[in-house]
Amino acid sequence: QVQLVESGGGLVQPGGSLRLSCAASGTILSIYVMGWYRQAPGKQRELVATITRGYSTNYADSVKGRFTISRDNAKNTVYLQMNSLKPEDTADYYCKANIRRSTYDEGRWYWGQGTQVTVSS
């Protein structure tokens, strides 16, 4: 069994910062890609940022220069530092990871349950 647990969401004023964390636990051999997605009310879930095991990153244009994704491979954890937050960043943020559980496993995608981020004055 594999679990992804997010933390760090909350209410913040425009211009403020938050740091999200997502820890993977369970039977894990390796994690290739980890990423953050978000879903605002009434909208489709969208990519925010991804990071490979080798630390290559990819960002949505809407968050470039404001958000930073990072990971700690030893802790199977991915982070999202969010600065200069805007009301339009308000959404549920989800962690996603491609996890290989054994040498017989080609890897599959897992989702966390999400953490809410609200940017409002």
Image: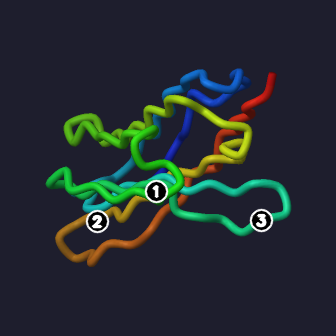
> Which numbered disc, 1 or 2, marks the residue closer to the eye?
2
Picture quarter containing residue 65? top left
Query: Which of the pair 4/10 is nearer the observer?
Result: 10
Q: What type is the residue that disc 3 sits on?
A: Lys
Image coordinates for residue 42, horizontal then vertical, percent? 85, 63
Q: What type is the residue that disc 2 sits on?
A: Arg
> Disc 1 marks which residue?
1
Question: Real-space Cα distance between discs 3 and 1?
Answer: 30 Å
Q: Is residue 44 above or below residue 78?
A: below
Picture quarter containing residue 18? top right
Q: What type is the residue that disc 1 sits on?
A: Gln
Find numbered disc 3 in the image and state the secondary structure of the residue it sits on.
Answer: loop
Query: Which of the pair 108/70 is nearer the observer?
Result: 70
The residue under the point 40% across, 59% down is: 97
Image coordinates for residue 39, horizontal then vertical, percent? 69, 57
Image coordinates for residue 14, horizontal then vertical, percent? 68, 26
